[in-house]
Amino acid sequence: WPEVLKERSRSNPAAHRSALIRLEAERLKRNPPTGPVIAAGSTGSIPATAELLGVIAGLPNGAVVLPGLDRELDDASFAAISAPGARPATLGHPQYGLAKLIGGIGIPRRDVEEIGEAAGPLALRAALVGEALRPAETTEFWTETRSRFSAGDIEQALAGVTLVEAANERDEAAAIAIVLKRAAETPGKRAALVTGDRALARRVSAELLRFGVVADDSGGAPLANTPAATLLRLALQAAFRPGDPVGLLSLLKHPLLGLGLDRQIVRKAAELVELVALRGGTGRPDIASLDQLFEARLAGLSGDSRQPFWFSRLSVRSIEQARDMLSRLTDALSVLTAMRVESDADIATLTRASVGALEALGRAADGSVTALYAGDAGEKLAELLRGLVAASSPFTFPASEWPDVMEALIAPETVKPAQGTDRNIAIWGALEARLQSVDTLVIGGLNEGVWPRKPESDRFMSRLMKTGIDLEPPERRIGLAAHDFQMAMGTKQVVLTRAARSGDAPAVPSRWLQRMLTFIGKEQATVLGRRGDMLLSWARALDAGERKDFAARPQPKPPLSLRPQHFSVTEIETLRRDPYAVYARRILGLMPLEPLIRDPGAAERGTLFHEILHLFSRRVEDPRAPGALAALVEAGRVCFADAALPPDIEAVWWPRFEKLAGNIIEWEHTRADAVARRHAEERAEKTIVGRTGVTLSGYADRVDLLAGGMADILDYKTGSSPSKAQAHTLLSPQLALEGALLRRGAFKELGIREPSQLAFVRLKPNGEVFEESILEYNRKPRTANDLSEEAWARLERLLFHYADPATGYLSRALPFREGDADGDYDHLARVLEWSAGGASDDEADG
């Protein structure tokens, strides 16, 4: 890499910086200025900077101002810090950098002059913090040094220090916002938060907004998350990575998507495209052919006998607006989609094409693109794109990698907005805090991983390799952070904050906080905590309100005239497990939206294999025939062709089916002697259930008529649900109810017959095929007649139960799993609200 840079007359930024610093040092050596030269605030962590500081210190009128050199630390401890070959842990001491610097300059610590003295309490605090952070090698001196600080000294030193230990990150942010707001309310006073946790900084910014304060956040916001940059990233993903409906829908609904149309028109058109082209079924939508997909699915819905509930609401005008929007969208991205196959695309060319696409996407109804480049974020994005277009160094790569390249280029960029509305409140990183002072300073996020950050090993160089070329290990950064913490403690009013949990996991207090609290003792630590508890109580009071009871568990009781008078066998399990879902669908008429279009999954595989077996059963009467296996494979080819699976999915499913086909024929052979005739997809007509007046109908996957006049009812299953236990205990009564319908002659082509067997035919992913009877479970055998009649009797009692006007449709009466709330109507039933309140009387009785 250095040779490549040399050929191109370029330099690594870090090497360029160091070279400039060393040139300045050489200049000062050659021509010492007659006037004063002062270097202040640097710890010399960069070797070139340390060399420059050494030169300045040797000038006739030169001076180096060292920030926070601890002149009170005993000589033994300071020697342990600055000793050659110190342990990596020693590099984490706050004085390590300064010790190394003055050692390089050649000045003993005792010869460093103190140019300013802190006030009494702050001087005491500095000494106390220095002792608390002394090197681990000399902590045995704590028993001696702790006695030098009386209770009054510690109380005086920490009079302006508060400790906030919040239960979670939200409470911590709210408490910090209160501190900043209160501190800045005093005229002429300033307050700041210093933290390396950007998530905490964003939370505090959000909490301050409730007070009408826009804080100065020096860290800024990631450019990648700004609206215009998000539109660009979504456009690139859609153009070069087709198949993701979520990304495509995000692009369609992006607030800056204009396409030269009124924003309201674009929004409504996007919603229509979502319903028609991006919801329901399977597939991999491509922005380049989205208009064709829209037309194909619109035509299919027009001729569908079971149209979705929203289809009748479509108007000719809305459809035309959607077509216009799709045409403009396809045209806007056509330049990028045409470049997908390029294997050697230039970054400047790709950037120009991307800018053109971005501006076409973001063009307002009046033709302007000002919204894309408005404000600090827009200016930053424009600056980045201009730099890429003007790049003089050739950089080529496959065009399909362009989204990843752009992500990498945009990731380090941040938008640092103009100064906030309240200049007395700021949010800083550790670097900015070194250079500024305020009246009240909050040191936020005092947990391990933030203060300090966890040292990360270099991906390319081990510790041993770094030591061999005089590079310091990652613990050196801990020492810099420790110095920042020590310096921050010199502010008159300091608030230390941390959260007991970070995300979903417990958090460990910062090692420096632990040391300080240990050194001052439990009694003094409690005093600091009491001050913080007051802030936390105020933070919680911000959201305190009138106590509200948990939402009641819904159990609507509609009039009998509105209650369903017909069910299919598949609905009975829902009626038992979640009656509210039946109420919402059948009585309120609320139909859930189809999920987003997706890759074919387990449900589609099950449907496909069902269709293959049904087609095979219709075509082949005797599975023992010589050509039965070939006929089954041919039926598979027909159904696979109709399914039009993506190639990568078909490459997995087809071999699985081929393996399954031979085992299916073998299983058929084991049954063939007893079977007189096989019937696939048999429909059971509506049949009145006992004296209820309610009818039941359904379909059976397969009914085999036996030579003796009885029949077996079989249900193909490619998954494990329902289980044999659920079917036997009638939690899943579908098979047993089909047996009851068979006994009552509901299958018109079969007549009245007695069921002999009720079984699942399991088609396993490994190709195994086996018949699983539900008539015996836990060594308790039942006959098919008995199980069918019990299911029928239970159904009759259940229907009588709902024929009572006092009976309501309870939400989640018998859920599959406690805690699940992903049913189609669980949100409508406010499951997460009422379930948090514990079991109700109705639930206990139900």
Image (cartoon, rainbow, N blue to C red):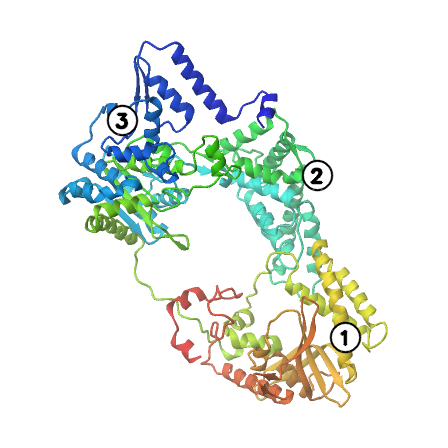
Tag 2: residue type?
A: Ala
Task: Name the secondary structure under disc 2.
Answer: loop
| Vertical arrangement, residue 272 with respect to residue 437, above or below | below
**Residue 325: horizontal and vertical position, in percent?**
63, 45
The numbered dot on residue 109 is: 3
Question: Quick one: quadrant of the C terminus?
Answer: bottom left
| Vertical arrangement, residue 201 with respect to residue 615, above or below | above
**Mark 1 closeness class: few <14, some 14–19, many ≥20 residues within 10 Å:** some
Given residues 561 and 273, the one toward you in this image is 273
Tag 3: residue type?
A: Arg
- Which numbered disc, 2 or 1, marks the residue that appears first in the sequence? 2
> Residue sitting at 41 percent across and 52 percent down?
503
Q: Quadrant of residue 156?
A: top left
Instruction: Report the Cα–Cα distance between label 2 and label 3.
Output: 68 Å
The answer to whether residue 93 is seen in the rendering is: yes
Tag 1: residue type?
A: Glu
> Residue sitting at 61 percent across and 84 percent down?
776
**Residue 118: horizontal and vertical position, in percent?**
20, 30
Given residues 387 and 521, the one toward you in this image is 521
Task: Name the secondary structure under disc 3.
Answer: helix
The numbered dot on residue 666 is: 1
> Which residue corresponds to mark 2?
338
**Residue 473: horizontal and vertical position, in percent?**
43, 36
The numbered dot on residue 288 is: none
Residue 715 located left or right of residue 530: right
The answer to whether residue 215 is seen in the rendering is: no
